[in-house]
Amino acid sequence: MTDATLERLPVAKAPARRDIGLKRRYAAERRFRFYGLAAISVGLVFLAVMLLSIFGKGYTSFVQTSVLLPITFDQKVIDPQNKRDSDPNVLVKANYPVLAQRALAERLGISPTDKPQMAALKGFVSDGVRTQLRNMVVADPSLIGTTKDVWVLAGANIDSAFKGQIDLDVAEGNRKVSDKQVAWMNQLRDQGVMEGKFNTGLFTFGASSRPETAGVGVAIVGSFYMMLIVLVLALPIGVAASIYLEEFAPKNRLTDIIEVNINNLAAVPSIVFGLLGLAVFINFMGLPRSAALVGGLVLTLMTLPTIIIATRAALAAVPPSIRSAALGLGASKTQTVFHHVLPLATPGILTGTIIGLARALGETAPLLLIGMVAFVADYPTTPLDPSTALPVQIYMWANEAERAFVERMSGAIIILLVFLMAMNITAIVLRRRFERHW
Amino acid sequence: MPMIYYVILVISIGIVALVIARRRAALQIQGAVKQHSRPHYHGWWAFLLATVPAILLIIVWSIGSSIYVERRIDAQLPQQAADGPIASRSLALSLVGRLADALHRLDAETLANLPSSFEELRPKLAEKGVALAPDTQDYMIPIAVEANRTGDALQMTGGVLALLLSIAGAAYGIRSIQPRARARNNVERVVRWGLLASSMIAILTTIGIVLSMLFETFYFFSSVSPLDFFFGTVWDPRFAAAGATDSVGQFGLIPLLAGTLYIAFIALLVAVPIGLMSAVYMAEYASPHVRSIVKPALELLAGIPTIVYGIFALVTLGPFLRDLSAALTGGSPFIQAQSIFTAGFVMGIMLIPVVSSLSDDIITAVPRALRDGSLGLGATRSETIKRVVLPAALPGIVGAILLTASRAIGETMIVVLAAGVAARLTLNPFEAMTTITVKIVNQLTGDLEFNSPQTLVAFALGITLFAVTLLMNIVALYIVRKYREQYE
Amino acid sequence: MNLMTDTKLQQALETSVDDKTDELIKMQGRKVTVHYGYKQALFDIDLDIRENQVTALIGPSGCGKSTFLRCLNRMNDTIAGAKVGGMITLDSENIYDPRIDVVELRARVGMVFQKPNPFPKSIFENVAYGPRIHGLARNKADLQAIVESSLKKAALWNEVKDRIHEPGTGLSGGQQQRLCIARAIAVSPEVILMDEPCSALDPIATAKVEELIDELKQNYTIVIVTHSMQQAARVSQRTAMFHLGYLVEEGPTEKMFTNPDDKRTQDYITGRFG
């Protein structure tokens, strides 16, 4: 059509505008939007503050002050009667801290006979030096009689002072390090033999009454055992249960009850599972307290509903046409499920499992009830040995008064969060990557 | 555990049966008749026949024989132990049990000329690394020896029976291989039973929770009256020495329940408005790009364990609020370091992602047509949300809030660390109050004798908690389900 | 389930033998009824399926033609609440007999669905799946031969032989449907059921599939449900007309389209309802 063919008609006249309060309404609209944004921001800010405060308190725990000391492995101290060939216990029982103290005195130019000065040295070097030097000598007795430069851990208070966490303006009597110790500290730092090193002990040590030799190594092993048990039990049982409910179960009262029951179990407070574990596994079945096995079983029961719900959703998302295709070829129901439906649901199942495992890893309350609040310094070798878990270790450190333990605790939280974030991000990535749109 | 060897043997028999059956079935393919099942199904059927009944027998037999042995020990314990109070009788039983276990570690020669007094026996056991309680009595040694003999004989019989059953099963499985035999259907039936059994575990867990707690609770109510428990206003469980019946203490639920509800209320006051508004924004305003970033971020935050929140309250927020209030009044702080407010507030932060993700799902389930209807009339976005979307979503949101409330009531670590342990009734949110979950943890950590009311009360608290949260969950899940069905 | 006794069945079988001796009855439905819950979907269907012929089931939507088709290999078993009555035989054996293994039945009576539904696996795996579960191949070479011949029979081989290990979901709609046919053929069924196999395809792909169906009838008995009367006229030898759950009329396709006995058939093929 061209203009020429258009009839020129007059344009309709708009009636007078009604007032529908547009201005007021748009203001309300903007306010409402602002509330929404504010709510999200407030939530995120709270969480940011929380995480920052924990990171701020905890990042220093990854550094540990150490001193380089020329240790002389004096036979007179270690094995005065020269009996180590006949009695191996001599090497184990020897007074190793004396060696460190003498070496320190030598470094600082203090005479070993100067009693008050020597007394002030106490606590400058961690008592953990006993184990450290003992292990060296037991591993290699030929060290005896030689001198060797060894990095040893500084005591907890010196460590705090060295990191600048102790206010030196406070009167000497009210703080945990003396002026003399601070002077020595500065002297050693200027000599270049005292520095902050990466704190490997945090990852390898177990529970300890001294902060500088306390670590989460033992707790991580305990948590690992429990996660292993959860994975080995909850994944197959959960998947099997979901397959039954989703693919085989007739729709009747019983399956209805099972379904409602599973949804409810997912929302039961975790501490109730702890009570169940205490009453059934420990009291009734007689399994040992504090064992990773019991913890793993309790966490398995707790994780099962999560895995079942996720797996059922994943199975239900597989389109029915796949099932009819396999059935139409003469595959049995079981073959159809195991050859086609289950493989297609795997990404969803894995996502659910990882999220369930992450929840189990951070769970604390039920473990407190089955005796995992235990002082465990040795690595558990089997799931039946006493062990503890990472979050429980954090809880125990939270009850310690010393400043240095708060630092360790925050460091342990960072480690726990890194594990959890890694797991959750894996789950999210997995889901995005393999999300299928049928 | 020698029984495990029988299990291994049975499984080996099963594997042998599997291989033989498969080969035999494969040979029959050459025959004229079309085979019903593929050879490996015949193999697995033989394997199942050889293993499943035998292993079930072993399990039942082990449980049965250990009960029988315990009965035998019980019957042989001398009269004075039998007449004593239950504690000492069960103690004697467990002493004999431990002694019998320890004797298993001794070599045959030592066992042959076993000393008759425990004094002489103890060092020999210590050599093997077994430490026994010093109050083990001399008369227990022959009982333990006898128990071991019976136990060993029973185990041997059971093991041999299981092996015979296994071989019989394998033979039957192999013999019954015919081209028309429905091995696949048989195997699949077993698989199906296995699947059904797995799904029963969920039911068993619930039954286990209810039964175990009910049992201990009844035990508790035998020393404390249910009326005093449910309606008592004083919580003062004195840690009395075992046996001292005069001072069981007072176990009033009311202060704990009040604290629980108060803290949960404050938590909801924080979490519901913030969480709901963020959900509305996310569902209605946020661009897909923002959604794709903020949603996973919220999921990550929901994954932070509650102990982290608890520590934050204990180490940072609590002292901060205390110092702040001290600075405000110039001296005495009116907010205690552990307080209802601190615990409730931090719990509220924890619940924000929970509320927001639950209500986000609910809001996005409201059908588009409803929104279009309102927008088509010229309503603004926010008018549509406030007058159409939210009212339509209301039942679902109520369900979501109920679910959140049940999380708040059952939450443990935050209140353990931030709420305090003092059981009292107060309305001031800046004072400490305690909750049901805190007391469950308190009563069960530490070296307490298990059968005292002080520990048993934890189960009464537990079942109360379970009942309350279960009720809320059932109602909430029902509402949410009905809501979803309405729009499907 | 069985409304008839065995002797009655025997009589039914005898009376139904056609006058033409070169045509054999492959499948036979007698008084077939289907209920979905309380709703009855099929009423007393008596229908014979002849060997090595294409039988088309036509009728307006919701008339029960697909339901009847799904009875022929018991796919209705997978629908909760579906109840089948009457009797259906395959080579004079009742397929609803409890002694019949449904899996074995479906290996003899294959099915192709309305929408192409290849497994999200490679083309090769799609075709090889059936022979694998039924143990039709002795070794790898055997399996490869089966896959190749099935794809050739489905007229797909030339198009996919270079990408046999690529996912079957990457093919075009028409190719996917032929892949599904190849997959069904690979099991060497006796009967192939096709449920509106071309409804999701474009005309060119449809032509190819129809051509294929025509070739396949030499070796297989084919039952096809279609909503297109032209298609029924093109591919089938016999046609059965369904309406509201009843079988209206059955006969040679030619006669059905030129001179039907029933008025409803006439109305339907002339487009008065449908």
Image (cartoon, coloured by chain):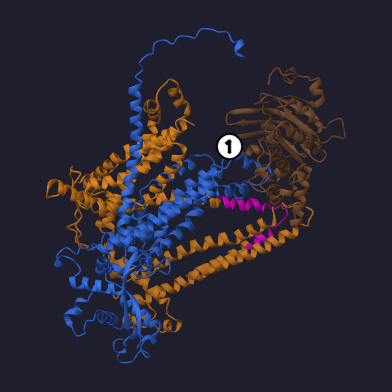
Chain colours: A blue, B orange, C brown
Asked where in the image residue B290 lies, by quadrant, the reply is top left
Q: Which residues are magenta?
A: B170-192
Q: Residue furthest right?
A: C21
Asked where in the image residue A171 lies, by quadrant, the reply is bottom left
Q: In the image, residue A365 lies at what x, y percent?
A: 33, 54
Q: In the image, residue A377 lies at what x, y percent?
A: 34, 69
In this rendered view, identify the residue nearer to me: C197 or C9: C197
Q: Secondary structure at mark 1?
A: loop
At 58% from the left edge and 35% from the top edge, which residue is drawn? C81
Residue tagged by mark 1?
C80
Amino acid beneath label 1: Ala
Horizontal side of A243 relative to C76 (left or right) equals left
Q: Is residue B273 visible?
A: yes
In the depicted structure, whether residue B335 falls above or below residue B59: above
Asked where in the image residue C98 lies, by quadrant, the reply is top right
**Predominant SS along the magenta part:** helix
Is residue B79 shown in magenta?
no
